[in-house]
Amino acid sequence: MTATPVANHTTFSALPMTATIGALGVVYGDIGTSPLYALKEAVKAAAHGGALTPEAILGVASLILWALILIISIKYAALIMRADNRGEGGIVALLALLSARNAQPGTWRAQLLIVGLIGAALLYGDGAITPAISVLSAIEGLKVDAPALTPLVVPLTIVILIGLFMMQKQGTGFIGKIFGPVMLGWFAILAALGIHGIVKAPAVLAALSPLYAFDFLIHQDFRVSFAILGAAFLAVTGGEAMYADMGHFGRNPIRLAWFAIALPALVLNYFGQAGLLITDMTAIDNPFYQLAPDWAQYPLIAMATLATVIASQAIISGVFSLTQQSIQLGFLPRMRITHTTSDSIGQIYVPLVNWLLAAATLGAVLGFGTSDALAGAYGIAVSLLMAITTLLAALVAIQWGYSPVIVIAVNGFFLVIDCIFFAANSTKLFEGGWFPLLLAGAVAFLMLTWRSGVKLVEGARGKLRQPEEDLIETAVDKCHARLSGTAVFLASAPNGVPLALTQFVKHNHCLHQRVVLVTVLIAEAPRIPEADRAEVIEVIPGITRVILHYGFMQYPTIYQGLVLACQQGKLSGIDLTDITYYIGRETIIPSEDIPGMWLWRENVFAFLQRNAERSAAFFGVPTKQVVEFGTEIEI
């Protein structure tokens, strides 16, 4: 992945240089730490248990270089980043652009939704692996200078990762502010070490030619070539963050950070490692650390550890952001989301996701034990995600009116490359590749089950919901006595009568003097400006419908939305401190007699619904002003 490492709603576009430095810390944290393990694994695959040759080293260096150029520089930086949703990128933004969320079952857009949700789920699976392999590979530098410390590598990694996950609750604003400068220093170190290695063996620069990579691969056994490709792919994992974080830093600063700083530093370091191996093939166990002089080993380990912590933090923040977006769009059940006080990385904290991700990451460290073993689990999820992104971006380009012939030719070329890398990584399925796929499969299953269950519940609600005309008739003809004050009823749909209001009238045979029906709608745009936030419709005197519009990257707060409507003069005569909110709390009853999902999936959905965050808490309704009405809904 990285998983979508996101700088949660911090935008630096007004300050291009600040945005460029900031992008180094968040966007390129993962790919920037790949030199710790990528070339090492690729060269070991090239040696395939035999003697390492200079031709193999040059072939691997050339392959990594051209993977960075083709996949990151051309596909992502030049092409994919054009497919933005009002400045935002990422798999969720692509789904929104294709209007797949509300697609009718059985249509091609509905199938795209399934593909897209699988892509989003892959980010979770890969997000568990990235912190594990990054921090573990940094701490393994201890083995180079002090082999006796080898037994401490896993315990130290565990301690660092536990501290990182525990810190999430407090927010990570301070660390967020130093992300960019620290990673700028890290890329400078990468470049310096690389130049040192190239000076030792200038002949390594011959690997600039793609012929070395091509010639080397075609003269290998098929299985060996696939192993090399799968290992070399580690050098580009994290590149998809360029697209995912586009809305936070801006397209141009991200491109500038890549072409001016990250790419040159990475290429120099990979070539420096290759140069070292040409002169000293015994350095194959850890060519990155052996590039440095002995006196610099421990400072380099400390710097590498800090860089991998930054990369891990960016990933964790990205998973939080992806979770929030998925909840907003109805792909996951509501969860408690805490807004921290920081103004940079980590502005939100999702406790459940944090500790589930921590358990998966720590399990990966304990289960695999070394970065070499984790390399087998790494890459398969990212390569599949990249293929899905290429496919969805092609459909967006065609939808925008680009020539289908050109789009199919260009995106088809990159899709073939993605599929080759996915096939190469698939050979690692039984070496650990099953782990991120298992995690991704579990998340995808929950997403699809929740999405299907929500549609079934909404269909059941629609049958129970009274038309608006019945409410008007009740208010005019049947409820002559009115209760004093204002009642706000939360409605799941912008039409008809909320079930909570139906229950209220049924049991009390009256209405309040002022009734406000509030619906929150999440748009397929990342943000909705405040001027368009509140839509107010007067049903009849005394009954008002308020529709609050939010983007999928905004947090929907009903109270703040009503305050804004009052300030804009759209809603008047209401004291928001003296109203009662009536909210329906539904109990889902799975049934075999009603067409829907399999009964066991309906039971899973019912479990998720029972344990979801309550509507009042999630939508920011003042808890002391809430009354809940229970309703049973059979699906």
Image (cartoon, grey):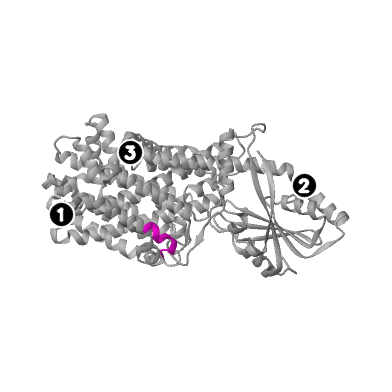
**Disc 3 residue type (three-letter):** Gly
Check disc 2 and report the residue beneath it.
Answer: 466
Check disc 3 and report the residue beneath it.
Answer: 432
- How far across and how far down the image is residue 368, in percent? 30, 43
**Disc 1 residue type (three-letter):** Ala
Residue at image position (61%, 64%) is 530
Label 2 crowding class (10 Å Cα cut-off): few <14, some 14-19, many 20+?
A: some
Check disc 1 and report the residue beneath it.
Answer: 146
Name the element at disc 3. Answer: loop
Name the element at disc 1. Answer: loop
Q: Which residues are magenta?
A: 164-172
Q: Nearer the viewer, residue 625 or 441?
A: 625
Q: CA distance from mark 3 to mark 2?
A: 54 Å
Report the number of discs.
3
496 relative position to 217: left or right = right
Location of residue 303 (image quadrant): bottom left
